Amino acid sequence: MSEATLQLLAGDPARDALVVGRVVLVLGGEPVTLEMAVPSGPIGFEDVLPILQGLTDFVVNRGVEVAESAGRTISCRAGCGACCRQLVPISQAEARALAALVAAMPGPRREEIRRRFAAALQTLHSGGVTREIDAAREEVTDSTAGLGMRYFRQGVACPFLENEACSIHPDRPLSCRQYLVTSPAAKCVSPAPDTIETVALPARPSRALLLADSEDAGVSWMPLVYALRYADEVPSRVPARTAPDLLRDVFSRFQDADGAERGERE
Ligand code: SF4
C-alpha cells in the first residue's frame, strides 16, 4: 500500500516563479518526507518528469533494499539489454520528452535515431503487432502481459539501445527505471511465463503518471517506439495546470498504482 500527499511550504503561486512543497509518501507502511521546489505557473506533465524520475529512483531504491535484505541479488548489469526488447509502455508526456530529446541531438545522430524508430515500427507493423497494440491502447493500462511476449518475439530493440546499454540512461522512462530482476539474466533473453523474478516496489509512479496524464490529455499509454510519430502528429497543448496541481494528481493515484511489478513489461 502507498499513499502520498503534497503540502505547500513556501512561496506564493500568484507571485513567485518557484514554490516549495513537501511530499509525504507512505511506502510499505513507512512515512517518507521529501521537499522540492516546483515552478508556480502553468506547466505540462513533461515539465514535472524530472521530479517524477527522482521519485521513481527513490521508490526503486526502497524496493532494492527490501529485495537485498531478503538475500536476493539484482541481476541487471550494463551490457545486458534483453529487457530493452520488451514493450515499454509510456505516457504522452514521456513521448513528448523523448521526442524533444531526439530533436536536440546533433544532426547525424538525430537522423540515426529517427531511422531506428521508423525501422522498429515497420517490423512491428509487418508482424501484425501494431494492430494488437492499437487495440490494447483502448484501455489505460501499463500491464501488457501476453501482448508483451508477442512484441518481444519480434526482436525489436529500443532505438536508444546501443552496445546493449541505454544511451539515454538519465532520461529513460519511468517504466524502464522500475524494471529490475533478481532471476538469472539468461531468463530475460529467453523469457518463459513465470520464470522472471522482478523486484517488487512499494509504488509504481509510472502507472500513477499514466493514469493522471491519460485522463488529462485523453491519450492512453503508448509503446516507446510510438513516441516520435506521436509527437510529430499530435500538437502539444497549452499547459493549464500548475506543478503543485499536477503532482497532487499523480500522487493521489499512488494507491491506484499499487500492484505486482511482474507482468508490467512482460
Ligand atoms: S529507454 Fe533505455 S532502458 Fe528503456 S528500453 Fe530504451 S534502451 Fe532500454
Image (cartoon, rainbow, N blue to C red):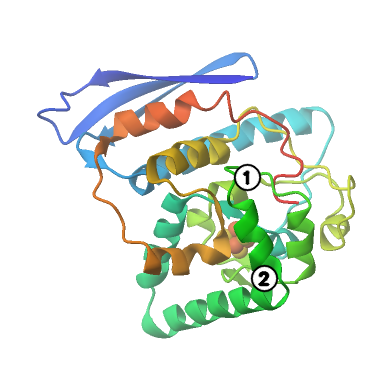
**Residue that appears at 62% across and 35% down:** 61
Q: Image check: 95 left or right of 118?
A: left
Q: Pinpoint residue 248: horizontal percent, then vertical percent.
A: 39, 26
Is residue 88 placed above or below 204 in the rendered structure?
Answer: below
Q: Pinpoint residue 5: horizontal percent, then vertical percent.
A: 43, 19
Question: In front here: 257 or 165?
Answer: 257
**Residue that appears at 48% across and 78% down:** 114
Q: Image check: 120 left or right of 104?
A: right
Q: Pinpoint residue 222: horizontal percent, then vertical percent.
A: 55, 55
Q: Which residue is mark 2?
A: 157
The numbered dot on residue 215 is none
Q: Image check: 256 left or right of 47?
A: right
Q: Which residue is mark 1?
A: 142
Question: In front here: 151 or 111?
Answer: 151
The answer as to whether callout 1 falls within 8 Å of ligand 1 is no
Circle 1 residues within 10 Å: few <14, some 14–19, many ≥20: many
Q: Is residue 25 among what the camera can see?
A: no
Q: Image check: 47 left or right of 61?
A: left
**Residue that appears at 31% across and 56% down:** 236
Q: Residue furthest left?
A: 15
The answer as to whether callout 2 falls within 8 Å of ligand 1 is yes
